[in-house]
Image (cartoon, rainbow, N blue to C red):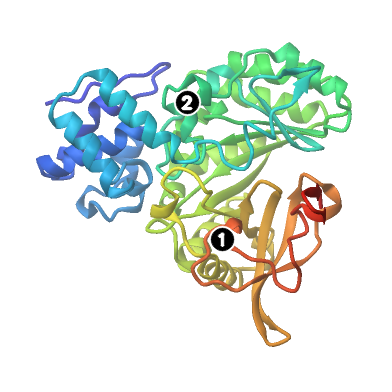
Amino acid sequence: MTLTQTGTRGFRAYTAKHLDELLKRGGFDDGTRLRVRAVASVLPFRTNAYVVDELIDWSDIPGDPIYRLVFPQEDMLPEQDVSRIAGLLRADAPAAELQAAVRMVRMGLNPHPAGQMELNIPKAGNESVPGMQHKYPETVLFFPKQGQTCHAYCTYCFRWAQFVGEPDLKMASDDSEGLVRYLREHPQVTSVLFTGGDPMIMSAPVLRRYVEPLLGLEQLESIRIGTKSLAYWPGRFVTDPDAADTLRLFSAVVESGKNLAFMAHFSHPREMESQLVQTAVRAIRDTGAVIRTQAPLIRSINDHPDTWVRMWTGQQAQGMVPYYMFVERDTGPQDYFAVPLARAYEIFRDAYARVSGLCRTVRGPSMSSTPGKVCVDGVTEVAGRRVFVLHLIQARDPSLVGRPFFAEYDPAAVWISDLRPAFADRFPFDPAVVGEGELLAG
């Protein structure tokens, strides 16, 4: 059976309706395929021909890291949830019953962590501004409507709720004029990050409609594009019909006096091995853009220091700048992918010690939590107590940036919410009790 490929502009995508046939390629039996389909009913699935044919080693299934990066796994969700939805699929249950069960599971997965919907959405008067987040004073995130999908979905993605067809969970806007107006009203904003989804799923003319209006804003110092396209569809910058137009737009940003930061997501060294990727990297860098690289630390995909050494040294050799190692966020299948903070620090430290100073631009392990980006600086002993040493790289409250603080050592902790303060009754960002029933923000 030949798989039907769908997509636009020559981009060939495989979606959930192709999942069963793709799994047959991996030799999975009927029961396993059914359970994977159950997981894919809750979490989004999308990949493409480049990932399937060029990146995945089909002789190493299910252990192949790129396969695990894009294909749902049958044990990715709690057993009772997988069994229930698999049973409904097996019984060909009515669509409404299936969707109700799926939605219940989704709502239990913390679909928008770190206050994304409650704390990050800005307001114009009393009205929320759609498709935008403003968590840190100097940076605004914008979610262009046409960029709210990806060339392929990562199974660990903390933005999974953007892709599951739940309107109340999706952030998106096509109001470029509204973005400019908001920026003019907030002169402290010096950086705009286009995110998604993946902005590079958009054609050059559509991307241009969002980017060009920003070039005349003197307050802006940088424009950032968060994207996985270099890993999942490098032809976007080399062989696609609008590749040259896209690169001209990048050059125009730099020529306007803005820094164009191309925030490239590489989760595994194999994503960087293709000659096409290396050609795309050179083309982007030739526009004057700076490529910064980042990825979360993911169990079963990149949870070994050797993997990060290969990534950071390979990136530096191609002129990219290693930027962040993130901790898997508290959303979606976190339990499946999370690495304990103590182990995360060991992996980071061991890899960091084996690279040159040019690679030591990288920061982490960093948790993008409600108060800000919390970095694990180390594990040490203070006054006879074993503790984590942490600091905020970025914070809602700028006065907290760079201030060290301590947490009791917990070898099982995977997120800031698992930690307890050490040598204090609260963390610096926690509310302080000043009287019975009265709280004061810290």
| SS type, badge 2 | loop
Residue 181 in the image: x percent, y percent?
81, 15
Looking at this rendering, what residue extends furthest in the front direction?
Answer: 436
Residue 130 lies in quadrant: top right
| Front tag of 2 and 1 | 1
Q: Amino acid at mark 2?
A: Thr
The answer to whether mark 2 and mark 1 are in CB contact below 8 A is no
Q: Which residue is mark 1?
A: 418
- Looking at the image, residue 158 sits to the left or right of residue 430; the answer is left
Local packing at callout 2 (Cα closer than 10 Å; few below 14, some 14-19, many 20+) is: some
Q: Earlier in the sequence, mark 2 or mark 1?
A: 2
- Residue 202 in sight in this render: no
Residue 401 in the image: x percent, y percent?
80, 54
Residue 114 lies in quadrant: top right
- Residue 138 in sight in this render: yes
- CA–CA distance in space, label 2 to label 1: 32 Å
Q: How many badges with numbers are in the image?
A: 2
Q: Residue at x 50, y 47 (%)?
A: 266
Q: Amino acid at mark 1?
A: Asp
Q: Is residue 427 above or below residue 368?
A: below
Looking at this rendering, what residue extends furthest in the bottom direction?
Answer: 384
- Disc sitting over residue 149 in the figure: 2
Local packing at callout 1 (Cα closer than 10 Å; few below 14, some 14-19, many 20+) is: few
- Looking at the image, residue 424 sits to the left or right of residue 336; the answer is right
Residue 425 in the image: x percent, y percent?
74, 66
| SS type, badge 1 | helix
Q: Residue at x 28, y 18 (%)?
A: 96
Residue 433 in the image: x percent, y percent?
79, 55
Q: Is residue 278 above or below residue 187?
A: below
- Disc sitting over residue 39 in the figure: none
